[in-house]
Amino acid sequence: MSAASPDDDRPVRETFLPYGRQSLDEDDIAAVCEVLRGDWLTTGPGVAEFEKAFAQIAGAAHAVAVSSGTAALHLAMLAAGVGEGDEVVTTPLTFAASASSILFSGARPVFADIDETTLNIDPERVRDAITERTRAILPVDFAGRPCRLDALREIAAAHDCALVEDACHAIGARFRGAPVGGVSDLTAFSLHPVKNITSGEGGVVTTDDPERAERMRCLRHHGIRRTSTPDAPWAYEIHELGYNYRLTDFQCALGLSQLRKLPGFLKRRREIVAAYDRELADCPLVLPPLDDDSAWHLYVVRLDRRRTDADRGEVFRALRDENIGVQVHYIPVHYHPLYRNMGYQPGICPVAERVYEEMLSLPLWPGMTDRDVGDVVAAVRKVTARRAG
Ligand SMILES: *Cc1c(COP(=O)(O)O)cnc(C)c1O
């Protein structure tokens, strides 16, 4: 590892290192090309093949492939029976799409604060947020770390609402030995390029409930149900308003090829996490707690207020100047003007709001070399040394 002096003006690296990116090989590319040369670009045999493999890895009876993680969340809301006049309890510390899916369904998001250590939704705050209008609980496995699904399940059951898990960060994570995807009533995943595996754009919902799976397959294809008879082979009926949320066959081929690499991707993510844990232990940072069950989508550090009064914005900019692509995950959802204009106020989730001021995500993706990891470590050490005390 190179040791950079705090006063060295040259950046630790010459080229920009993003916080996340896809890891594709020639065999991923070949898998897509094979489909492009065939008969079915969309709605062909590749969709069912991908869904079957995904369901198996996620430990669920059914997987429904859709065009994005956002579409997955939207259909999961509808399959959970969420609609106009309902409330859904969710976390403020997430990508806005989690809460958008609640708004799409006509319901109102209710933000419950997070646990300061895991940064996941706090089941006690969920309990406080439940009303007679609550139809679902939508926790997010933040950074790939599974939520307290046992406690959330219990709360959902006691109040007769659905547990819909946003596992967009958590493909390959486990909860008490079981794969994430088979624990909640419905679980939504994303296949966007920064996520743990990709299909370009794409998403999946898993469930053990055959009726919900069937309804989501119908909703992703305009709400169409085939009613062909020998006399009317063209016949189909639309019973409810559906969408075009289909995933193409060539994207499914990429998704399937990537799914085979998931164990190797997870292993490399864990190696990088172990290196950060080791090399950054004495920096004025709160490092993410150890978790062997996390999918380690993000490595989120916080400025340790007992050891530094450095400003997060300043540390962020200094690391960008070192060509380290740090990010902030996330601006609390209720801070956005869309939500302010609906009447949500700062102050409703004090833990998330405080943590937001301190947090930074360091680069983490399987294709990072040991040298890339060393650059991140050197830059973080350089920048935090300069700003300590
Ligand atoms: C990425 C992400 C989504 C949305 O997924 P897309 O595939 O980009 O639509 C939703 N929730 C969380 C927590 C995410 O990180």
Image (tube, rainbow, N blue to C red):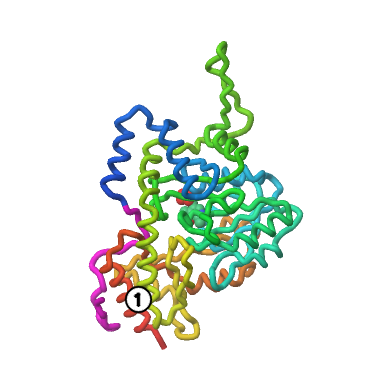
Q: Residue 274, how many percent across, how many down?
A: 38, 71
Quarter occupied by the N terminus: bottom left
The location of residue 55, given as percent across then percent down, is 49, 45
- 121 is within the stretch colored magenta: no
Q: Which quarter of the image is occupied by the C terminus?
A: bottom left
**In-front residue for pair 19/100:** 19
Q: Is disc 1 surrounded by few (<14), some (14 to 19) or many (20+) residues within 10 Å? A: many
Q: Residue furthest front?
A: 177
- The residue identified by callout 1 is 380
Tell me: 314 left or right of 156: left
The three-letter amino acid code for the residue at tag 1 is Val
Q: Residue furthest right?
A: 132
Question: Residue at 51% across / 70% down in the picture?
Answer: 356
Instruction: Examine the rendered structure and indicate whether residue 36 appears above or below residue 90.
Output: above
Q: Is residue 131 above or below residue 61?
A: below
Query: Which type of secondary structure does the marked residue at label 1 adopt?
Result: helix
Report the front residue among 99 and 267. 267
Q: Measured from the top left, where is residue 94 in percent x and y?
A: 53, 60
Residue occupying image coordinates x 59% and y 44%: 208
- Quadrant in the picture for residue 50: top left
Judge left or right: residue 253 versus residue 95. Answer: left
Q: Residue furthest top?
A: 231
Question: What residue lies at 66% left-to-right and 46% top-to-bottom?
Answer: 82
Q: Main secondary structure of the magenta part?
A: loop
Per the rendered image, the range of residues in magenta is 1-23
